[in-house]
Amino acid sequence: MKIYKIIAMSAAAVMMTVGLTACTTFENFKEAFFDTKKSSDATVTIGIYEPMSGADSEEAAEEIQGIELAHEVYPNVNGRIVELTYSDNASDIYAAETAINDLIAKNPDIILGSYGSVYSLIAGEYINEAKIPTIAMTNMNPLITQNYDYYFRVCYVDSDQGDILGRYILEAKGETTAGILMPRDDDAAMATGTAFTDRVEGETGNEEAITVYEQYDTGDKDFEEQLNVIKESGVKSVLLPGTMEDSAKIINQAADMGLDVVFLGDIDWASEEFRDLLQDNVSPDHMAFINFFTQEQAVSEESEKFIEAYQTKYGTEKDPPDSVALGYDAYIIALNAIDEAGDDITGENLRKILAESSSFEGASGTITFNSDGDPIRTAYISTWRDGDMVSIYTVNPN
């Protein structure tokens, strides 16, 4: 997707404001859009810190697509035009430091990004020093928000995904036991597995609820031994917290063996790349994974607006990816904070507003930030059926 800098002209912004007012889900947004007391050439700036070139640019483009779509829907706030300013970290850890400092020098009110946890970790210290609230969209490293007070995110961290998958088998499937098949020496997989175990054991009161726990080395090709252990255990659900490539190989081999088990996975399984790794004989009933957006059921007015805007611009042939919806939500969360700030658009005040925000209704569901800046939010459990992602369960915040 071509990345461009949006230059909004005052007259166009006024006309777009009138046309879009009826769509907004926030009453204070509606009032703000009609505020004509402030100068029409006043602006607020949202910085976009992303890898717009290099190895990570394709994934980052989806986040940017969501941001820009939201900007088209909401081009101004509180009588001010919203300008987007971009900084390319070039998918490079050395370029990232320069990119974030260049962006900070442009004095954005809020920053969105970056795809790729490592680039956000590099930016975190500078963002804290500059006191500019920043919202990440898809990176899941818990250290980003734990270490940097001005960082927030709209997606779950790895451990949260394990907890949600545990809730799914308990609430939706009514199961009291499960299995885990995970890679050795993988910290993210361990975090997911630990949270899954804690949820299942805690809810059942059974310290042996995880009845089978098998391991493998990342990149292995044959999992027959582990799958036979799973088959003999009799469990009906098995967590696979490894890479999508390893998980697809395991699921494919299990299908060849006729294993009747539901494999549970993280957000990576919601990608078309993962779908394309699966064999034709894999049943949709034998996998379930987390995703953050479902087009099948619009969960809010904002969901409906997002879907309409996406289909108007990109057509109806393809469903919007999760990362586009998360980029959209990050932008409107930022705008909501700016709107609430009124004339006090300082980094400290915007951070305070974000930290205190509750039950924000975005395109991807309901979002509340916890004390670390991580979301307590809606998630969906889905599967791939005939090439399409199908939602099978909604996990609401608790």
Image: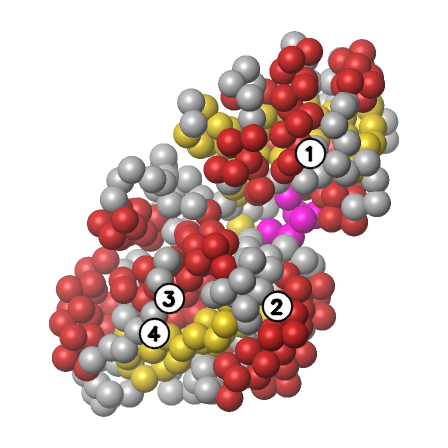
Local SS, label 1: helix
Q: Residues within 10 Å of mark 3 (few under 14, many from 20)?
A: few
Q: Is residue 161 visible?
A: yes
Q: Which residues are magenta?
A: 156-161
Which tag, 3 or 2, sits closer to the chain's start?
A: 3
Q: Which residue is mark 1?
A: 246
Q: Can you say whether 29 is above or below 60 in the image? A: below
158 in the magenta segment: yes
Q: Which residue is mark 2?
A: 92
The CA span between labels 2 and 4 is 22 Å
Which tag, 4 or 1, sits closer to the chain's start?
A: 4
- Looking at the rendered structure, the kind of residue marked 3 is Ile
Residue 337: image tag = none
Residue 3: image tag = 3
- Looking at the rendered structure, the kind of residue marked 1 is Asp
The CA span between labels 3 and 2 is 18 Å
Residue at x 59% of width, y 81% of height = 98
